[in-house]
Image (cartoon, coloured by chain):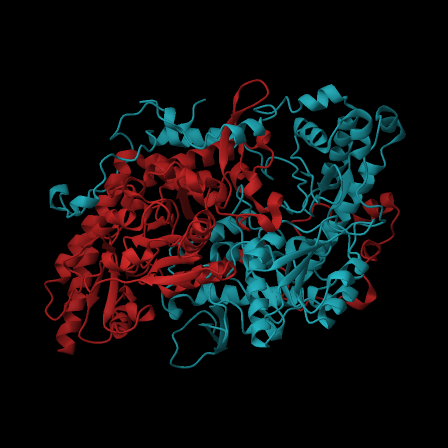
């Protein structure tokens, strides 16, 4: 089928609208600013638009389509009630510059979310303003920067990140002007305290780390790392991308962190939407609270002079922290994502712990099933991948390395990933974290059944029985075969070009 | 626990692995950091209970559905065609991740490539990414991008000139994004008629970039914008912030020398949504391609020569380039950009022109009606506008808003929240959604108010 610019409609067809309130000849438009040619938007009728996008959707794989074990992305089920709530006019038509009395319902939801997120992470204050995880990182590092300035320590110009960190960590800190010190992981994929000791010092502003780390392993020496960084005067930043593993079991606060971001689009089921939107609130300890971006929601006892509101006892209001860094998004963040995650949280309440238990149960179970094929299966598999790290337990995700297959047969992690596409699955994350060579990173999430995991493990084994030729040609059952990404980068075609 | 398919099968699964209890799975968390006991949170709810609470809370919000609204100030009442909400709910789009595996993501990749084309057509620039968070972050990213491209040759190193009218909340975002790079922001002056001072603009020559908005934050369309590029020259980037629906009638900024165009996509495809999620537009000329932020989709082919799309130029991005990336942007606003693409697909060339004309006309009618009220002033009446303008009252504008609110009208935005010395100025907005009836009601109420206050 064609792309949307190849439909053969004529200009002026299609979508009808009410007429302007004035005849066109009476509408004043500055003549020097008038457009000479109309933008060549597509020419389709409504039925064609519906069919085009429906067709495109059939060429896209989502969680609703099938198992999506994309490590580090927490591709859990997105409950549809969340969508119904986010589509209510009380949120879609609300303007953030309206007065407080107009926004009491939303503010109460935001307040509840701030409180809940603070409790779950052991943090004192939470702002919902950052609209993505990376922006949360950036915001928190900016707060740390202002904190150091406020205590006369703005000479601290280095941020430490492990080599297994998400790329956004160093990118966010660099945007704040910091020099990045990357420290190597130990043999086991865990934080190497000696490596940390070697770099931490008077110039350390912060350390950014996720726990469990990107190999899915709990950093059991995290408290010692926090002590090291703190005793040098640095701050500890928790990348919340892997928060799904630990709710109700531990908190970043207990581990010694000063600041944390949450990915509502991972842990709290805001759909990923093919790349966004997300929401990346941050939580901080008291000493950083006054630097948080404004506004935040607070509440006070309702007074007689207040309007009715939504809560008989409380009145919700916006406030600006005293030494706020200002804003990172010009409004209040992504409230549309926050209400979805609020609905998700309400499903669990204090039982959020169960969510993490099942995420970890599923990850360990799938790891066990993949690494322990039946004898019958094992006979057919010429070479097994190895654990990315040889630990007894993983948390919400785990890594495998295809290095033995690559060395013996030339089969890469990418080949296995593409082979899995042919079995009807989304591929795991590949080649990340960088510390695991030929890495496949698998995160099943809590919303997959035992049966799905069993079947996936057995299909994974089937892929391992396939030879180099077959796998290198995979996928063959998908809408297109292996896409030439090199060609895309060399011969850039970034838009449709009209021929006339 | 309707989200957990393995409830009740835990023991079975644990036994297969050789574990005795769920606690075994968390034995790697040291005692000293263990959280014990129950999270101090409320109890779980069923879907029905959640919906009931959501209705109670969100129905308590007062919106343009309950009151007539003339509030714009950066986010605009619009109509989102019904098919957008329906199609966007398709799980294949909604529940997919960033299309790292192109073979099973052709749908979203193609939709974004088409979106890039639409933005390119609107702005008159050849390149667009698949969205930034919103117009403020898009402007901020454009500024840092321009500095990376131009700083080497700039005579005013690390310096960017920004219109003094940029509202404080947007400027604050720009300041946060530029501070780390040591970028100096200087202000561009405006004359009392709301137009840019073109003499002052010549000071920007030799700097890395100039950032202005069209319409500007007072709703004014400045004809001077077409001369900026000539004044500042090739080695200073002209960054223009736009309201995209206006481009149905207004010249594409790329055609008067804009190097980067940013803007708030919201009026195309998505409701105001309390300020988010919305989407930022980012388009640029070729010179900025390798320094721009965000995801870009390219057209290529598969191993048997079929047309296929994939993410490209990823070597700019954080997951490859880490601390040397052009931006930390990872999660963006793809799904919202898709809503914009759907809306634009329906509109077509004539439809977007009509949409722009509806905005022009509604504002013009509103201004004409209000100008019949004695005592109101229009400080920028001689300028041309898109869908907003300033009304000056003989008393405090915030008081006007409070009074209007009691009378069922969200009357606009008090400019004293943004600027000094304009306590009496109200920014009012009429969009394609504003009806003649609403304008009459607004006019009559304001006339009453002026009578009462006389």
Rendered residue at 32%/41% (across/down): B254
Quarter of image, res A225: bottom right
Please state which of residues A328 and B44 is positioned toward the viewer in this rendering. A328
Q: On the rendered structure, is A81 left or right of A427? A: left
> x and y percent of residue A154 in the render?
59, 70
| Along the line of sight, the residue nearer the viewer: B278 or B172 | B172
Residue lying farthest to the top in this orientation: B304
- Determine the colour of chain B: red
Q: Position of residue B69 (x, y in %)?
A: 28, 60
Question: As rendered, which of B245 and B167 lies closer to the eye?
Answer: B167
**Is residue B34 visible in this depiction of the protein?**
no
User: Residue shown at 69%/72% (left/top)?
Assistant: A233
In screen coordinates, is A260 left or right of A85?
Answer: right
Picture quarter with the N terminus of chain A: top left
Q: Which chain is cyan in the rendering?
A: A
| Residue A181 shown left or right of residue A404 in the figure | left
The answer to which image quadrant residue A487 occupies is: top right
In the displayed structure image, the side of residue A147 where residue A104 appears, left or right: left
Residue A460, position as x, y percentages in the image: 75, 31
Residue B328 visible to an observer of this rendering: yes
Q: In this view, does A49 lie above or below A122?
A: above
How many numbered marks, from 0 up?
0
Quarter of the C terminus of chain A within the rendering: top left
- x and y percent of residue B377 in the render? 15, 67
């Amino acid at each position: 089928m064609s792309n949307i610019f190849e439909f053969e409609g004529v200009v002026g067809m299609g979508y009808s609208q009410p007429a302007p309130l004035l005849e066109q000849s009476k509408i004043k438009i500055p003549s020097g600013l008038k457009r000479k040619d109309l933008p060549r938007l597509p020419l389709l009728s409504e039925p064609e638009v519906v069919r085009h996008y429906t067709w495109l959707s059939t060429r896209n794989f989502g969680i609703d389509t099938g198992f999506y074990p994309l490590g580090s992305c927490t591709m859990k089920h997105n409950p549809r009630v969340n969508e119904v709530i986010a589509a209510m006019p009380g949120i879609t038509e609300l303007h953030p510059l309206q007065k407080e009395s107009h926004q009491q319902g939303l503010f109460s939801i935001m307040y509840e979310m701030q409180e809940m997120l603070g409790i779950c992470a052991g943090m004192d204050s939470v702002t919902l303003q950052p609209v993505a995880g990376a922006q949360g990182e950036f915001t928190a590092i900016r707060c740390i920067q202002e904190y150091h300035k406020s205590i006369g320590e703005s000479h601290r110009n280095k941020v430490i990140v492990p080599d297994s960190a998400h790329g956004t960590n160093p990118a966010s800190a660099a945007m704040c002007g910091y020099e990045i010190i990357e420290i190597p992981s130990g043999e086991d994929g865990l934080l190497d305290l000696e490596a940390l000791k070697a770099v931490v010092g008077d110039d350390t502003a912060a350390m950014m780390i996720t726990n469990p780390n990107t190999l899915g392993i709990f950093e059991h020496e995290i408290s010692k790392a926090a002590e090291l960084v703190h005793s040098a005067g640095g701050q500890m930043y928790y990348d919340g991308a892997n928060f799904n593993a630990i709710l109700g079991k531990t908190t970043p606060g207990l581990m010694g962190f000063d600041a944390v971001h949450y990915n509502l689009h991972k842990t709290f089921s805001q759909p990923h939407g093919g790349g966004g939107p997300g929401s990346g609130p941050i939580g901080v300890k008291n000493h950083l609270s006054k630097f948080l971006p404004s506004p935040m929601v607070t509440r006070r006892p309702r007074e007689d002079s207040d309007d009715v509101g939504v809560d008989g006892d409380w009145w919700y209001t916006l406030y600006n922290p005293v030494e706020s860094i200002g804003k990172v998004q010009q409004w209040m963040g992504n409230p549309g994502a926050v209400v979805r995650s609020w609905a998700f949280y309400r499903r669990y309440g204090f039982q959020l712990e169960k969510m993490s238990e099942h995420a970890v149960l599923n990850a360990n179970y799938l790891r066990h099933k993949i690494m322990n094929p039946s004898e019958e299966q094992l006979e057919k598999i010429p070479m097994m991948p190895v654990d990315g790290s040889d630990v007894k337990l993983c948390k919400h995700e785990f890594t495998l390395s295809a290095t033995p297959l690559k060395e013996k047969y030339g089969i890469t992690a990418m080949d296995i990933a593409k082979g899995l596409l042919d079995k009807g699955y989304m591929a795991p994350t590949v080649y990340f974290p960088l510390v695991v060579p030929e890495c496949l990173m698998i995160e099943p999430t809590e919303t997959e059944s035992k049966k799905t995991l069993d079947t996936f493990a057995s299909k994974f084994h089937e892929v391992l029985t396939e030879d180099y030729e077959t796998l290198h040609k995979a996928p063959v059952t998908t809408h297109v075969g292996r896409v030439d990404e090199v060609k895309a980068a060399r011969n850039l075609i970034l838009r449709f070009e009209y021929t006339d | 626990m309707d989200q957990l398919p393995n409830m009740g099968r835990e023991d079975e699964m644990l036994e297969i692995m050789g574990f005795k209890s769920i606690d075994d799975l968390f034995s790697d968390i040291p005692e000293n950091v263990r959280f014990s006991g129950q999270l101090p949170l409320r109890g779980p709810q069923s879907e029905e209970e959640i919906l009931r609470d959501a209705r109670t809370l969100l129905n308590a919000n007062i919106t343009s559905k309950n009151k007539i609204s003339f509030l714009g100030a950066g986010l605009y009442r619009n109509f989102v065609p019904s098919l957008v909400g329906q199609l966007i709910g398709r799980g294949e789009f909604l529940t997919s991740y960033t299309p790292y595996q192109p073979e099973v993501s052709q749908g979203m990749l193609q939709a974004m490539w088409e979106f890039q084309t639409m933005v390119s057509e609107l702005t008159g620039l050849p390149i667009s990414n698949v969205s930034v968070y919103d117009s403020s972050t898009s402007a901020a990213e454009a500024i840092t991008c321009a500095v990376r491209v131009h700083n080497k040759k700039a005579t005013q190193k690390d310096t960017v000139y920004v219109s003094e009218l940029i509202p404080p909340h947007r400027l604050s975002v720009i300041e946060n994004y530029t501070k780390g790079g040591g970028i100096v922001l200087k202000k561009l002056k405006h004359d009392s008629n709301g137009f840019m001072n073109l003499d002052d603009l010549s000071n920007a020559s030799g700097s890395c970039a100039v950032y202005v908005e069209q319409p500007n934050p007072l709703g004014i369309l400045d004809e001077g914008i077409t001369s900026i590029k000539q004044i500042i020259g090739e080695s200073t980037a002209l960054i223009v912030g736009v309201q995209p629906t206006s481009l149905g009638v207004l010249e594409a900024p790329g055609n008067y020398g804009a190097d980067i165009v940013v803007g708030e996509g919201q009026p195309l495809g998505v409701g105001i949504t309390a300020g988010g999620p919305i989407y930022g537009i980012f388009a640029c000329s070729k010179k900025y391609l390798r320094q721009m932020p965000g995801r870009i989709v390219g057209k290529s082919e598969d191993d048997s020569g079929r047309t296929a799309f994939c993410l490209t130029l990823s070597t700019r991005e954080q997951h490859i380039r880490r601390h040397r990336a052009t931006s930390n942007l990872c999660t963006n606003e793809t799904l919202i950009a898709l809503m914009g693409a759907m809306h634009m697909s329906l509109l077509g060339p004539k439809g977007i022109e009509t949409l722009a004309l509806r905005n022009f006309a509604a504002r013009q009618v509103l201004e004409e009606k209000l100008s019949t009220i004695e005592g109101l002033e229009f400080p920028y009446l001689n300028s041309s506008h898109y869908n907003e303008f300033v009304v000056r009252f003989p008393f405090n504008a915030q008081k006007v808003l409070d009074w209007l609110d009691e009378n069922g009208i969200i009357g606009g935005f008090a400019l004293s929240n943004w600027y000094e010395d304009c306590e009496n100025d109200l920014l009012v907005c009429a969009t394609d959604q504003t009806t003649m009836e609403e304008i009459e009601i607004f006019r009559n109420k304001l006339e009453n108010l002026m009578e009462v206050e006389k």
